[in-house]
Image (spheres, rainbow, N blue to C red):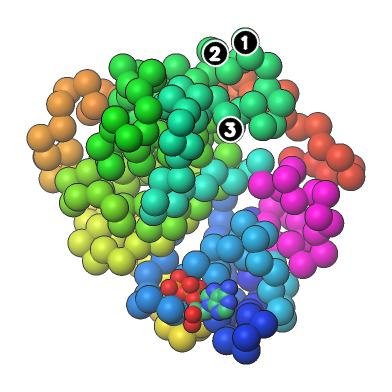
Amino acid sequence: MIEFKNVSKSYSNGTKALDGVNLRIEQGEFVFIVGDSGAGKSTLLKIMMREEVASEGSVVIKNRSLNTMKKRDIPYFRRHLGIVFQDFRLIPNMTVYDNVAFAMRVIGAKEKKISNRVPHVLGRVGLAEKAKCLPNELSGGEQQRVALARAIVNNADIIIADEPTGNVDTKRSFEIVEMLNQINASGTTVIMVTHSEELVRRFGRRIITIKDGKIVSDDISNISVEPIADSQVFGDLDIASKRAIREADEFIRSYNSTIEDSTTEQPGGETDEQ
Ligand code: ADP
């Protein structure tokens, strides 16, 4: 459902950031993208988000060609994506609740639906009690969980996370990746860029390594390693947070079935088929 064929990207200053990338990611996969700084990881993600366009080759996501996509269709395409950044990108003068609600308001959701959905999602990331806080009243890990709530609130099919653990400590990093794992368990594709070898080792998923704009390894053998013991991942998380993580999967599953009918209408005759 994500397919890159011979994709190259040159920026206007002549830098070749991607060079002949071939890649296929199926719906429901969890993929780590690793590589040194400057390797081309962000460029790859930006092309997936249609922030940048490939200079050569073709990119198809959910049956849509990103090469030929019209500008007016980009916002509708992006509804399929939930995006999480290293620096959280929360709106500083909005409460936690409003930061998450905002993502629903911009797509025109009704306030009634928002007031049902947002507390649920905040509960599932263990932040129900922080709804009225401003971002600067939260720890880094908590801010990233708000960003995660915002990414899943519209029921995205694909979560794209660009170094989401870059600004939080190791313990909280595991917590965030474990939440991404739970989101993935409900069928959402997760694509995560990271520098952390420890995370990649512990979570044992597909690892795509990029070097100088090329994919130099694509290690799908990692998909079936043993699950990590709770004690390793959760460390000293409190019981409520553990429960919240566990319930996230169940919640997202049930939400999937209720939202489908209200989000399928799109302009340009596009459908939600994959
Ligand atoms: P990574 O995310 O792996 O650090 P990037 O995709 O950000 O790598 O960058 C790949 C290469 O493209 C680097 O050499 C970087 O300097 C260059 N680059 C990234 N964005 C731009 C841009 N907007 N204009 C020109 N060069 C860019």
Instruction: Give the structural element (helix, strand or loop) at label 1.
Output: helix
Task: Tell whether circle 2 marks a residue whose Cβ is less than 8 angstroms from ligand 1.
Answer: no
In three-dimensional space, the C-alpha distance between marks 2 and 3, rounded to whole angstroms, equals 13 Å
Picture coordinates of residue 106, whole percent (x, y)? 67, 32
Q: Residues within 10 Å of mark 3 (few under 14, many from 20)?
A: many
Query: For this view, does 4 lie left or right of residue 189?
Result: right
* Kind of residue sitting beneath label 2: Ser
Give the residue at the far front of this rendering.
93
Picture coordinates of residue 242, whole percent (x, y)? 23, 28
Q: Residues within 10 Å of mark 2 (few under 14, many from 20)?
A: few
Q: Which residue is mark 3?
A: 103
Magenta span covers which residues? 60-78
* Kind of residue sitting beneath label 1: Lys
Q: Is the C-beta separation of discs 1 and 2 under 8 Å?
A: yes
Please name whichever residue, 111 or 154, is drawn nearer the observer in this view of the structure.
111
Q: Which residue is mark 1?
A: 112
* Kind of residue sitting beneath label 3: Ala
On screen, residue 193 above or below 122:
below
Q: Which residue is mark 2?
A: 115
